[in-house]
Amino acid sequence: QSVLTQPPSVSAAPGQKVTISCSGSSSNIENNYVSWYQQLPGTAPKLLIYDNNKRPLGIPDRFSGSKSGTSATLGITGLQTGDEADYYCGTWDNSLSAGVFGGGTKLTVL
Amino acid sequence: QVQLQQWGAGLLKPSETLSLTCAVYGGSFSSYYWTWIRQAPGKGLEWIGEINHSGSTNYNPSLKSRVTISLDTSRNQFSLKLNSVTDADTAVYYCARGQCVVEPSRWFHPWGQGTLVTVSS
């Protein structure tokens, strides 16, 4: 059981937009920055978004992040088949004094 | 371009000690949180713990009694030890560099390639 809650799966057609939610609490998301990771099959996770909405160098602006209260959202526009992957949100939990992640969301591009 | 390369034993028996090492190439050891994260087969990511350049550690409360993370600044390496392993510790273990602008928030980049550790009698 993950501390952060994500939908197990989302799907959309190529070229469309999808959003992935990440729900937490006042001990984690509400009071800390959120990051997002993409994990392609058989590979290590890759940082997509940090500090709620910042993109590292090399990450296209099709990927965006936002946060409101105890929830965060990853948005992906112009979906491509290469975006099929598992996506994870992460943050710090002040009560646990530990890093925490969501359970992951599998994106299918139909 | 910082790169992390990790290694360690991939097959353990129950009650043995898991030991992994991660080498940092191309970057400074200072001002970061050197982190271990694991992923059980078909499951999500689990944060194990971290160590900063001063040697200060934080551990996941669920693993704290069995985990030790240490640092060798002379070799630009950090290590994970997890004792008394069971089947539930079977996972891919990743090392990662944790970055932080506003405490205590962290993000993790880059990541090591991952090491599959299987616990089986």
Image (cartoon, helix red, strand yellow):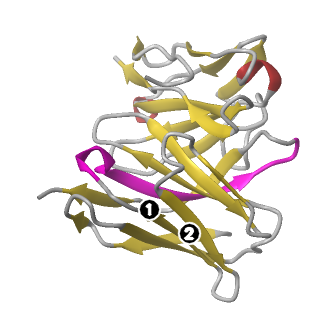
Kind of residue indicated by mark 1: Gln
Q: Is residue B85 magenta?
A: no
Residue drawn where x is 41% and y is 42% of the image: A40
Q: Quickly name the residue at label 2.
A: B4
Q: Which mark is residue B88?
A: none
At 56% from the left and 69% from the top, the residue drawn is: B4
Amino acid of disc 2: Leu
Please identify the residue farthest to the front as the structure is shown: B65
Q: CA distance from mark 2 to mark 1?
A: 8 Å
**Does A103 sit left or right of B35 as displayed?**
left
Q: Are marks 2 and 1 in contact (CB under 8 Å)?
A: yes
Q: Are marks 2 and 1 on the same chain?
A: yes
Snapshot quadrant of residue B56? bottom right
Relative horizontal placement of residue B2, taking residue A87 as reference (left or right) = right
Q: Nearer the viewer, residue A79 or B46?
A: B46
- Residue B19, located in which quarter of the rendered image? bottom left
Quadrant in which the N terminus of chain A is drawn: top left
A55 with respect to B19 (left or right)? right
Q: Residue at x 35, y 67 (%)?
A: B17
Q: Which residue is mark 1?
A: B113
**Residue range corresponding to the magenta coloring:** B86-102
Q: Residue furthest bottom?
A: B74
- Point out the tag, 2 or 1, that comes first from the N-terminus: 2
Depicted B53 relative to depicted A49: above or below: below
Q: Nearer the viewer, residue A3 or B24?
A: A3
For numbered disc 2, what is the local secondary structure?
strand
